[in-house]
Image: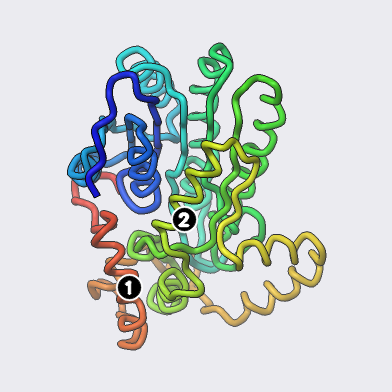
């Protein structure tokens, strides 16, 4: 599908964390709806690949290297966008990191990384764009949280910690901006088939952790089609909806946890005990899923590799390739 290139007066959308995966798909969907795009991520190489993919569809896109965990970098970028490209009418924060492993194998660094990217990232972007949006009396802010920010998923504790914070911040920000014309949307997806399992970080018994997480992030019925998810996310953000809950499992999980939190906690405890145990942090390292696939750690079973074929296909399509050694992932 080749879309007409938006003109200089077309609305501008800023998507943070759009070099690959869901962020890339959200940027593409906004571009297809007539928005000019500015996308950022930490890797210049991945941004170049994303730009090529988006411009091949006739979309107008500019890229910028930016670490959303750095408030000064975010402020400078938003100021530059508003000055050079025009007013940001839509801002979506997608940047994230997935760390999989038991508490016994986690360190404070895992929590620092998760909170910096997935809690401070949305805060930094929102604080940077909200002032100009309020002065104009209009704007849309979307933050991609997770079912992991509504129900604490075992072996994803740093992720859930950051995402719970992001849910609270985004919902609270919407209330603070009531009546200003600026709408804030909390997006809570479940697992999506973007190939993210190849870029997730695994600690503890990496092979065993990968063996349960990768199929969960790949299989139809568990993992959602990411293109359909991007359409629904953009629909919700542009409409200014308070919440966008994606996938049946997310909706069921949120409702069950709300109605019966003690029962949910007990069930999650059982699930956690069924997952692999892990050695202490000093006895293990943290590797990404593609490293497990490449055999730098014991490979998962042939069955796991077979049932994650759709995930690897999505990874190739949505730029989830291994990072260049000189680039930040």
Q: What is the number of the mark on residue 294?
A: none
Frontmost residue, 30 versus 50:
30
Task: Judge from the rendering whether residue 177 lies leftward or rightward of residue 299; answer left or right.
Answer: right
Horizontal and vertical percent for residue 258?
A: 78, 59
Q: Residues within 10 Å of mark 1 (few under 14, many from 20)?
A: some
Picture quadrant of residue 119: top right
Frontmost residue, 61 versus 173:
61
Instruction: Determine if residue 249 is in view.
Output: yes
- Residue at (60, 58) in percent of width and height: 147
Task: Judge from the rendering whether residue 276 lies leftward or rightward of residue 262; answer left or right.
Answer: left
Picture quadrant of residue 76: top left
User: Quick check: 101 above or below 170?
Assistant: below
- Residue at (37, 44) in percent of width and height: 29
Horizontal and vertical percent for residue 58?
A: 21, 39
- Residue at (42, 18) in percent of width and height: 87
Asked if the residues shown at circle 1 and circle 2 are in contact, with their CB atoms under 8 angstroms apart, the answer is: no
The structure's colour scheme is rainbow
- Residue pointed to by mark 1: 310
Q: CA distance from mark 1 to mark 2?
A: 16 Å
Task: Judge from the rendering whether residue 305 lies leftward or rightward of residue 124; answer left or right.
Answer: left
Task: Judge from the rendering whether residue 218 lies leftward or rightward of residue 175; answer left or right.
Answer: left
- Residue at (40, 36) in percent of width and height: 15
Horizontal and vertical percent for residue 282?
A: 44, 64
Horizontal and vertical percent for residue 204?
A: 45, 70
- Residue pointed to by mark 2: 229
User: Quick check: 18 above or below 104?
Assistant: above
User: Quick check: 50 above or below 303?
Assistant: above
Instruction: Determine if residue 205 is in view.
Output: no
Q: Residues within 10 Å of mark 2 (few under 14, many from 20)?
A: many
Which callout, 1 or 2, points at the residue further toward the start of the chain? 2
């Amino acid at each position: 599908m080749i879309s007409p290139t938006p003109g200089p007066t077309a609305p501008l959308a800023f998507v943070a964390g759009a070099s690959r995966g869901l962020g890339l798909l959200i940027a593409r969907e906004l571009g297809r709806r007539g928005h000019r795009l500015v996308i950022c991520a930490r890797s210049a190489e991945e941004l170049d690949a994303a730009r090529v993919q988006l411009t091949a569809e006739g979309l107008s896109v500019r890229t910028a290297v930016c670490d959303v965990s750095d408030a000064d970098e975010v402020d400078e970028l938003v100021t530059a966008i508003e000055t050079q490209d025009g007013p940001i009418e839509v801002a979506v924060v997608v940047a994230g990191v997935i760390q999989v492993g038991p508490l016994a194998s986690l360190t404070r660094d895992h929590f620092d990384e998760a909170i910096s990217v997935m809690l401070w990232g949305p805060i930094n972007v929102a604080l940077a764009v909200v002032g100009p949006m309020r002065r104009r009396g209009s704007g849309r802010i979307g933050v991609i949280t997770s079912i992991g920010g509504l129900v604490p998923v075992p072996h994803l504790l740093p992720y859930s910690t950051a995402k719970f914070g992001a849910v609270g911040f985004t919902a609270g920000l919407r209330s603070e901006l009531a009546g200003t014309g600026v709408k804030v949307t909390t997006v809570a997806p479940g697992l999506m088939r973007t190939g993210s399992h190849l870029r997730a970080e695994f600690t503890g018994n990496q092979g065993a952790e990968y063996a349960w997480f990768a199929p969960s992030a790949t299989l139809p019925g568990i993992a959602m089609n990411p293109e359909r998810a991007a359409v629904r996310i953009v629909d919700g953000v542009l409409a200014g909806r308070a919440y966008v809950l994606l996938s049946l499992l997310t909706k069921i999980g949120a409702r069950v946890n709300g109605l019966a939190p003690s029962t949910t906690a007990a069930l999650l405890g059982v699930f956690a005990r069924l997952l692999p145990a892990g050695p202490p942090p000093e006895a293990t390292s943290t590797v990404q899923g593609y490293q497990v696939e490449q055999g730098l750690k014991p490979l998962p079973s042939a069955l796991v590799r077979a049932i994650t074929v759709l995930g690897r296909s999505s990874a190739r399509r949505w730029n989830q390739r291994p990072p260049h050694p000189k680039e930040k992932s």
